[in-house]
Amino acid sequence: MSLAPTPVLTGPTGSLLDLIGKTPMVEVTKIDTGPCRLFLKLESQNPGGSIKDRIALSMIAAAEAEGFLKPGGTIVEATAGNTGLALTLVGQAKGYKVLLVIPDKMSKEKIQHLRAMGADVRLTRSDVPHGHPEYYTDMAERLAQQIPGGFYVNQFANDANSAAHFKTTGPEIWEQMDGDVDAFVAGIGSGGTITGIARYLKSVGSDAKVILADPVGSTLAGIVNEGVPGPEGSYTVEGIGQNFVPDTADITLIDKAYSIPDAEAIATVRELLLKEGVLAGSSSGTLIGAALRWCREQTEPKRVVTFVCDTGAKYLSKVYNDAWLADQGLGERELHGDLSDLITRKYENGDVVVIGPDDTLDTAFKRMKGADVSQLPVIDQGRLVGIVDESDIVHVMNTDEITRQERFGKPVGSVMTRDLDTVQVGEPLDALIPLFDRDRVAIVLDGDAFVGLITRSDLINHLSLNRQG
Ligand SMILES: Cc1ncc(COP(=O)(O)O)c(C=O)c1O
């Protein structure tokens, strides 16, 4: 372990905004970095939890200075979440209203966080291209024109965006690396980060290579490497990748790009948490995945910097949730070519939330709510004996037992359905349809043994992941 000097503690500050920037840097020591040393700048330590705090501060200050934003005004932006959090943090501190337009694929933690901070969040479609009236930037621009005192921040074409990185992130990296950096790796959302830092490093005479980390499905890596846009597609990582070159991005500054698939990005952040203890967001997996590829390709020792752009706490229900990964087809699992391929939670692995016949309805209901399911298999001594769902519980509400305690104290075995709609694991997909037509969930057995449940949503998800098939 390198011995860093004891950090100098400063006294309390009057504003959270004073704590933006000056983020720490940590070396990756337990993952194979080839002959190189890889350093992570922890932008997740900013008060808003991401690198975007820096640009919110500078874009709002510039708008005030240029007279675009006046007291009582409304800050309007199109954002995948982090810029919105940052603008809300800075905007609220300065007394402005904040209205954000967000594509509907974004994680619910970010949206909940924004609403709780007082932002007016408008969700819009994530399946339409730039130029469509419901595309998030087009919608934000229109709203800003309609609202009196509205200021459309437009991080994609705002000079104060890359300027924030030229003035703060770039100099911090230079100082923390003692002026010795061979490459830095970043993604492009707006392009502010990569452009501002590349410009700064060049301005101090550094010849550090500038590496773009791009998700597979974003067209930018193709433009950098081959001069033509790469194939466009959808991807899971949030905050980076584009199907156009934003005005804020100067891609002539970029030396090389890597296209990183979602599965590699996710495996990388999971490994980072396990081995290094760093809880990073999904797009940081794209960055670190690209940085590791570059490092491992080198034949001589190099010093490389990349970022943890935001905290993984915003993605606990996604990247760090095995059931979600399996639903997305991103988990590590064997396919058997039978109905078990549709079952994301298998009984034999202990993944199915179940109940016993002697448990009370109170317990059953709490378990359903906790697991966000509407039915539970009833298991007695390892064998499936019934199923209890919300309608069974509703029926009990209609009985003579008048107190809540009496109703909810009833045993599951007294209300569960014993007449089970089962299918054998080897049956074809078609076998599910009659069950779903009767509003049932499919109970899958292998002989007598309970394998798991298949819902309509599992079938739709399976078909949508296997569209090419
Ligand atoms: C979550 C996240 N947001 C934003 C960025 C960069 O954004 P921009 O190009 O807008 O500066 C990155 C990566 O560089 C990122 O991982």
Image (cartoon, rainbow, N blue to C red):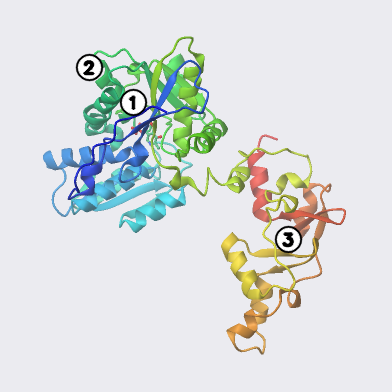
Seen at 37% across and 26% down, the residue is 245
Are dots 2 and 3 in contact, CB under 8 Å?
no
Label 2 to label 3, Cα distance in Å? 67 Å
Q: Position of residue 280 (x, y in %)?
A: 45, 39
Figure quadrant, ligand 1: top left
Q: Secondary structure at mark 2?
A: helix
Determine the image quadrant of residue 365. Answer: bottom right
Q: If the image is split into quadrants, where does the C terminus sit?
A: top right
Are dots 2 and 1 in contact, CB under 8 Å?
no
| Disc 1 C-beta below 8 A from ligand 1 | yes
Q: Amino acid at mark 3?
A: Asp
Q: Amino acid at mark 1?
A: Ile
Q: Secondary structure at mark 1?
A: helix
In the picture, the disc for residue 469 is none
Q: Amino acid at mark 2?
A: Ser
Label 2 to label 1, Cα distance in Å? 14 Å
Q: Position of residue 409 (x, y in %)?
A: 65, 80
Number of numbered callouts drawn: 3
Tell me the residue that label 2 is attached to.
203
Asked whether residue 125 is in view, the answer is no
Q: Position of residue 330 (x, y in %)?
A: 61, 38
Tell me the residue that label 1 is attached to.
194
Front residue of 204 and 84: 204
Tell me the residue that label 3 is attached to.
437
Q: Secondary structure at mark 3?
A: helix
- The vertical placement of 229 against 464, above or below, is above
Seen at 45% across and 35% down, the residue is 283
Q: Report the mark closest to the observer, 2 or 1.
A: 2
- The vertical placement of 99 against 420, above or below, is above
| Disc 2 C-beta below 8 A from ligand 1 | no
